Image (cartoon, coloured by chain):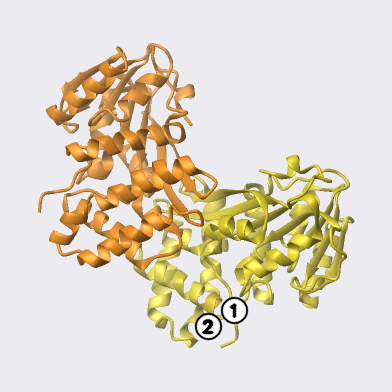
Chain colours: A yellow, B orange
Amino acid sequence: MRPYVHGYDNIESGRLRDQADTLADLLHHDSVYPPGAHILEAGCGVGAQTIHLAGRNPHAVITSVDISADSLAQAQSAIDARGIRNVTFQQADLLHLPFETQRFDHVFVCFVLEHLPDPAQALRALLPMLKPGGTITAIEGDHGSAFFHPESEAAHKAIRALVELQRSAGGNADIGRELYPLLVHAGFDAVHVSPRMVYVDGSRPELLDGFTRRTFTAMIEGVREPAIKAGLMAPEDFDAGVRDLYRTAGADGVFCYTFFKGTGLKPGSSGAAPERSRP
Amino acid sequence: MRPYVHGYDNIESGRLRDQADTLADLLHHDSVYPPGAHILEAGCGVGAQTIHLAGRNPHAVITSVDISADSLAQAQSAIDARGIRNVTFQQADLLHLPFETQRFDHVFVCFVLEHLPDPAQALRALLPMLKPGGTITAIEGDHGSAFFHPESEAAHKAIRALVELQRSAGGNADIGRELYPLLVHAGFDAVHVSPRMVYVDGSRPELLDGFTRRTFTAMIEGVREPAIKAGLMAPEDFDAGVRDLYRTAGADGVFCYTFFKGTGLKPGSSGAAPERSRP
């Protein structure tokens, strides 16, 4: 089975950009750093979060790295299309970053840890990149946080199929809830995690469409073939699950999903001004 | 099997009061009504929420009803002990309230709908009690919203055992997510639901103790005997589930639970001033 990884797939790229637009305020309203700050975005993928990070920090100096040259090319196009000029892209492995230590004031890592076999190792590799007193911000979803009305066993099974595919590719789609212990054990101080729930009901049509249908359910629907090929679900069961997820976006439906945003400080006396960047 | 119902049990009463104190700010910081408002608290139980409602609205006129004379006696003691004087208790059935129509400016119903076989019927019975333009506020938990780290199948099964017991007693412990469609279908206008997540990690010791251990896990532990008697779980499995729930309150643990607060307006021109009471 081809490992399923968000963002390394043309079909996925459009979905990830839709998701980023819908969720930008929820996740990034407080992703704000002091002017002149040097920010490392670790694992920028196709630039879905880069455009929000750069848009909210026009006077910061942003270095965005990813291991995939294809993704970086798409990310470059995305920022060029928006006239953003304060981002430099560089191909690099998170675990072997080609930067001198203590180069950055802030590290930003969004929807990346979920794909790594050892997220704790990645966080430990990011710590030396920061100046003492610099901050890390990590954002992750958690598919186990999803619940909805009407209730559906098939829908939960379809979600678990995606979680299993991501696990078999070395990732963890339930990682959001673990940000606090991960950041603490990696050696960050003053760790603070805030949950960001997307709550969708019939009074919020932009989220019914932008999140429940086009982001979450489309993501589940996107793993139909690999889930069936891997024997995780029978086609008719998977299809029933997807149908039930779409039903939660009806007038009487409700859908809940929680993202987590964690921040921490690199121990040592502060050379940065971290206050504005901490939610 | 004796139906399990929160609040009609001496052992439960202390737990419910602890829960109310820990959660009061999260749930009630915006349970604020204009001075002089006439408020009906429908289903006050032992007064766990009454003390917060009255404490935040010292110049409102509160009528609190419950079907149980025993609970009402405890509720009266609770408000007397705090010197609260603006609450009148009255024994009544929610479905047959002994009040003239349009008597109240606001209706407040907290942790009650979860116990009713037909919550929609109860909401329809409350609507005539309100003046046109008056508001309803409904607050409920949702046990299906619980997720945690470390993950545990046994813990989820123990939670589902409580949900099954409550279902067999005619209730619905997953009702929080349904507040929006319930309020809309009962005939309220401008329905707005806000989720209130309790997020607990090692940096929040007051919640580790006050919520994860003494509120949620204690509640699950409290149904050990009926869950085993009903054949829902073997004793060793139930005990493993409870042990795993306590483990989520360890230094590396994380626990998430979501309450829902819904508000709505009775259609018609306003005689009340609902702005301050709507979150």
Q: Report if residue B103 is visible in the image.
A: no
- Please give the name of the residue rendered at 63% of the width and 68% of the height, measured from the top-left corner: A119
| Label 2: element kind | helix
The quadrant of the image that shows the C terminus of chain A is top right
Number of the front mark, 1 or 2 = 1
Q: Which residue is mark 1?
A: A4
Residue that protrudes farthest toward the front in the picture: A268
Choose the circle earlier in sequence order: 1 or 2: 1
Discs 1, 2: same chain: yes
Marks 1 and 2 in Cβ contact (< 8 Å): yes
Q: Is residue A232 above or below residue A126?
A: below
| Label 1: element kind | loop
> Where's residue A104, x and y in %?
83, 56
Q: Report if residue A107 is visible in the image.
A: yes
Judging depth in this view, the residue of B38 and B18 nearest the camera is B18
Q: Chain of mark 2?
A: A
Judging depth in this view, the residue of B77 and A36 nearest the camera is B77
> Where's residue A102, x and y in %?
84, 58
Q: Chain of mark 1?
A: A
- Please give the name of the residue rendered at 51% of the width and 57% of the height, measured from the top-left corner: B252
> Where's residue A17, x and y in %?
68, 62
Q: Which residue is mark 2?
A: A226
Judging depth in this view, the residue of B202 and A194 nearest the camera is B202
Label drawn at residue B232 = none
Q: Amino acid at mark 1?
A: Tyr
* Displayed quadrant of residue B86: top left
Q: Is residue B120 above or below residue B44?
A: below
> Where's residue A99, x and y in %?
86, 66
Q: Amino acid at mark 2?
A: Pro
